[in-house]
Image (spheres, rainbow, N blue to C red):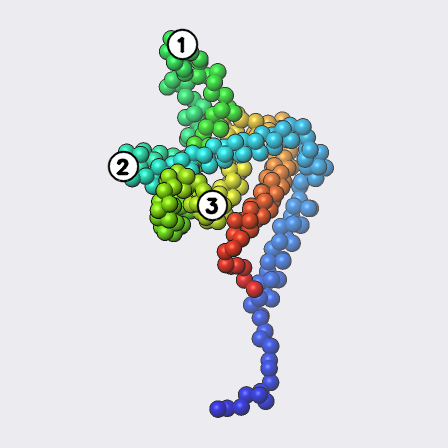
Amino acid sequence: MEDISRLEHVRRKHVGRYISAVAVVAAVSWIVMSFVHGQIDWAVVGRYLTARTIVLGLGNTVLMAALAMLMGVVIGVTVAIMRLSANPVVNWAAASYVWFFRGTPLLLQLLLWFNLALVFPELGIPGLLDVRTVDVMTPFVAALLGLGINQGAYTSEVVRAGLLSVDQGQYEAASAIGMPRLQALRRIILPQAMRVIVPPIGNELIGMVKLTSLASVIQFSEVVHNVENIYYVNNYVIELLIVAAFWYLTVVTVLTFLQTRLERHYARGARDMNPR
């Protein structure tokens, strides 16, 4: 065997790595300098960053995202369990729900809910309780129903994937000790499935924060809607859009941190997949 102990060790030159790093730094610097020295009035950005209308819109955005996501999770878990049911009628109903709400655009669904009065002028029980649909279907209610029910279709597939990831032996063990199916799902299956469910649900929540901006088309007073109302008057378009972007990035950063902590909690005991 050839003796290689006397050979000189030469470090590998990562020329491509250096070139790509320089290119990225140059591109980022160009973008930053364009914003800094462009036709942007940063004083206007600072003034509107904490304006009352913007803060109220931000609060509505966070509230709507939280409520819609909560509704989506409740619906999603229910539909996922229905999809795994041996009852063909229940299974078909759940699959049809997922098919319809994943197959139509969210914007279309929001408009349908907001204009529901054109189909059902009144809601309630005939002769006992009748209310006008236009009085009930406010922009807030229409946005909540549109976002929450749509989210339930996507969440159901995430939850179903998590339930299917649990070994079949867990189901059989729960059945062997006489545990009812729903109790087994709540106490044995779902806790194990959370490790698979949490990351995509966290991504869905972050996506929901941004999807609330679609509710501006039905006059829901969230960040984008309030920003638009302001720059229609003062013409500071890019400045107000920067304000909206800042608050979206702030909320997403906080949610990303919380998602990471939650993932670590449910990943306890699992094999560490982080690269060394």
Q: What residue lies at 37% left-to-right and 49% top-to-bottom?
A: 173
**Tag 3: amino acid:** Pro
Q: What residue lies at 58% left-to-right and 34% top-to-bottom?
A: 62
Q: Residues within 10 Å of mark 3 (few under 14, many from 20)?
A: some
Q: Which residue is mark 3?
A: 191
Q: Which residue is mark 2?
A: 88
In whole angstroms, how far apart are the C-alphas of marks 3 and 2?
27 Å
- Camera-side mark, 3 or 2: 3
In what quadrant of the picture does the C terminus appear?
A: bottom right
- Camera-side mark, 1 or 3: 3
Check whether the beta carbons of the residues at disc 1 and disc 2 lie within 8 A of each other: no
Q: Which residue is mark 1?
A: 128
Which mark sits nearer the N-terminus, 3 or 2?
A: 2
Q: Is residue 184 above or below residue 16?
A: above
Q: Is residue 275 visible?
A: yes
Q: Residues within 10 Å of mark 2 (few under 14, many from 20)?
A: few
Q: What residue lies at 44% left-to-right and 40% top-to-bottom?
A: 186
Q: What residue lies at 69% left-to-right and 33% top-to-bottom?
A: 50
Residue 86 position, x and y percent, is 29, 39
Left of 42 or right of it: where is 214? left
Q: Quadrant of residue 18?
A: bottom right
Which mark sits nearer the N-terminus, 1 or 3?
A: 1
Residue 241: assigned label? none
**Tag 2: amino acid:** Pro
- Out of 144 and 118, give the one closest to the viewer: 144
Residue 91 position, x and y percent, is 31, 37
Q: Is residue 114 above or below residue 102?
A: above
Check whether the beta carbons of the residues at disc 1 and disc 3 lie within 8 A of each other: no
